[in-house]
Amino acid sequence: MNRCGLLTSKKEPVPLKSIEVELEVRDHVATVVSTLNYQNKEDKPIEAVFVFPLPGDAAVCHFSAKMGQKEIVAEVKEKQEACEEYDDALSSGQQAFLLEESDQSPDIFSMSVGCLPPGESASIRLEYVTELAVQADEGLRFCLPAVLNPRYTPQGSKATAVQVNSVPASLVPYSLSFSARVSSPRPISKVESSCSLDPLQFLNTDQTQATVKLGAGHKFDRDVEVLIYYKDAHQPTAVVEAGQASAKPGTLMGDPVVMVSLFPEFPQSVMSSVASCGEFVFLMDRSGSMRSNMNNKDRSQTRISSARDTLLLLLKSLPMGCYFNIYSFGSSFEHIFPKSVEYSQQTMEEALKRVGTMAANLGGTEILKPLKHIYEQPCIPNQPRQLFVFTDGEVGNTKEVIDLVKKNSGSHRCFSFGIGEGASSALINGLAKEGGGHAQFITGSDRMQPKVMQSLRFALQPAVVDISITWDLPKDVSVTVLSPPITALFQGQRSLVYGQLSGQSSEAAEGCVTVKYSLAGHPTQNQLHFSLKPEEDTGLTVHRLGARTLIRSLEMEGRESRGEQHTGVKEKVVALSIQSGVSSCFTAFIAVNKGDGEVIQGPLVRRNVPAPRMMMRKACFSAPSMNASIACSNSIPKYAPMMGCFSAERRRKSCAEKSSLKKKSPGAADSTQPEVKPPPCDPLLQLVSLQKASGFWMLDSALAAALGKTSEEVKKSKPELVSSEVWATILALIWLQEFQTDAKDEWQILAGKAVLWLQAQNAPNVTECVDAGNALLGCRVQKDALGL
């Protein structure tokens, strides 16, 4: 075999040379164009297969291949038909290209480049559109997933494992270049990234257009996360996009489509009250991959240790009067209490003791069983259930998990957290969307704690109920809503609604959309007036996002139904996918080079292009080595990777029988002795760990040490007629306000508990205490700043 060209760590030739990504952001919607450059440096024709991640909510809308000066644009076809056409082309010695979405997870795609002759190059162009999620600090987040970790599929699951030929991210043998162009009606404040960026270049004086690109020497060893900040970002907007000129009026692509972006503003009187009830269930991933570092730069903290620190903050921040429980899972699952218990000093201490010994020693990632167990527990009257799910998202049965959450969405809200590179965006976003909660991703140098505490603040907000949307349009215009009903609203968080507009209207006509809901018993509504005049040059982005939204809703409806109804849903999805040119789980992009070129002769060599990964969990796979295999175009490799819907065996099942792959016990490789957590060394966590459940601190040597003082200094400074607990609590609040300002998002809720406790004590001489505390700690904190 000719060992030339790029090589993996196993010395296998890699036909993928480089990836070029161009990002265009318009307000809060992104269009992404990826060009993948392949070159066959071997002496035989090859088939290159690349399994890779995309954002879970992306709408793939273009796929084409260019060889020399010839370009072939792929068509969207029913998946089985597309796969058969691809196989027929390979059998005939024709060049063919196939792009398909995983049956089990919409954030995993497979690209097959078939019959690339010796010495020939091909450039593959892939285009998708996606919405940008709003972050806690009002930034818009775009993530280019570079890392695809192995997805664990539990034994007995209906899902087929998506197995990936992968190497450690630092050894990926192809390069990445990335550039972005940003435009918005509002000025661009800044653009940040988890990766090194060149300086932002503004294209006009009002700073509404700018370009930026990755700095030189970027390593393709992590996801590329970009945060975009606008001035006055939280403004409701509506964009009306004209239909496609070549499409038939009355169809989705032929009619105008409106995208409404809503930012509800809740009354301050309601927002100032924090809920003092609820059942808080925390579900923590303890699979082997949670031993990985949070990021490649800082190896001092692992995912599991960060999760333990986060649980400490959460438990200290819960309100008195609520109920809680903590589950952890891997191949099996555990829970601290048989059922949720009332929050008290005793139950909090018992939980913290167990949290301190949590280790990433439970094997694979089987999230379905603990979720079922949680849902089987009866809800506690007048205690709304709030579920917090922490996982690195490496599961293979994504759709099963999301469907289960949706089935139980009426009994709880679900807040999800994707930890580390390679977390499945389809899983994390799907859990929150179907569970009426909020999703967060913790990557790069992010701290988990502030993002989780923001979600806790959302969970403590009163639940919004009776949500409805009404449209006020001219009499000759009607709307067909493409989005599923809104089930959750949070202060400052965006909700998107897509609608197909039918009928004729004048250019000066206006429409109005009204969102009505009830918040803590108060009927509230927000309105948005918008012009019905379509915007020019939007590239059908809104149509494709609207089609993607409707396709996902129909796919879920199909999974919930059986028999003829399922068949009918599939037909609708296929028709909509073909009409809009947007991918679905029932369709695929297929392109065949039917030119006058000669038939490609000789045995076809299969090359599985490695995807970057953070680590290979030993328990994930026990299949034979996934080395590249050699196969004739009419046969299959003996041990071809089982790639779910991308399976070569399924496409060529008439050629050979599938090999038998035995699974190893999923927990065997990851079992270790429990890792005992040392006392927190972080100054903030050290102080937080000393707070009592009801909100106060004890005046003892541990508190003095946390404040950087001796016990004698602290006791000597205490004003007379003030209890030790009041004095200790005020000192803790002053220290937080003065020395942990940057971490306020992390301690704000537990500080609020301390203030409520102080107010309940009716303590005298509070002003004197604050002055004495400032003198002791060398601070200048005002009493009002403490909320006293």
Image (cartoon, grey):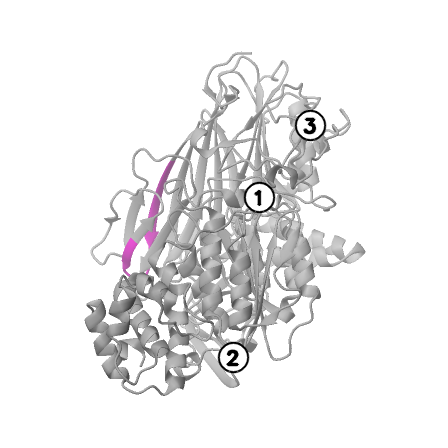
Of 615 and 184, which appears nearest the observer?
615
* Residues under numbered marks 3 and 1 in contact, where contact means CB atoms less than 8 Å apart: no
Comes first in the chain, label 3 or label 1:
3
Comes first in the chain, label 2 or label 3:
3
Judge left or right: residue 161 versus residue 467: right
Of 734 and 587, which appears nearest the observer?
734
Residue receiving disc 1: 673
Judge left or right: residue 587 versus residue 442: right
Q: Is residue 739 above or below residue 299?
A: below
Looking at numbered disc 2 in the image, what kind of residue is underneath it? Lys
Which residue is located at x 75 percent, y 55 percent? 566
Which residue is located at x 34 percent, y 43 percent? 195
Kindly report which numbered mark, 3 or 1, lies closer to the viewer in this rendering: 1
Residue receiving disc 2: 516
Q: Is residue 615 above or below residue 753?
A: above
Residue 367: x and y in percent read 63, 52
Comes first in the chain, label 2 or label 1:
2
Q: Is residue 11 above or below residue 60?
A: above
- Circle 3 residues within 10 Å: few <14, some 14–19, many ≥20: some
Judge left or right: residue 704 versus residue 153: left
| Region of the chain picked out in magenta, as a range | 177-190
The answer to whether one can see residue 254 in this image is no
Residue receiving disc 3: 88
Of 722 and 372, which appears nearest the observer?
722
Q: Is residue 326 magenta?
A: no
Q: Is label 1 in a helix, a strand or a loop?
A: loop
Judge left or right: residue 672 versus residue 28: right
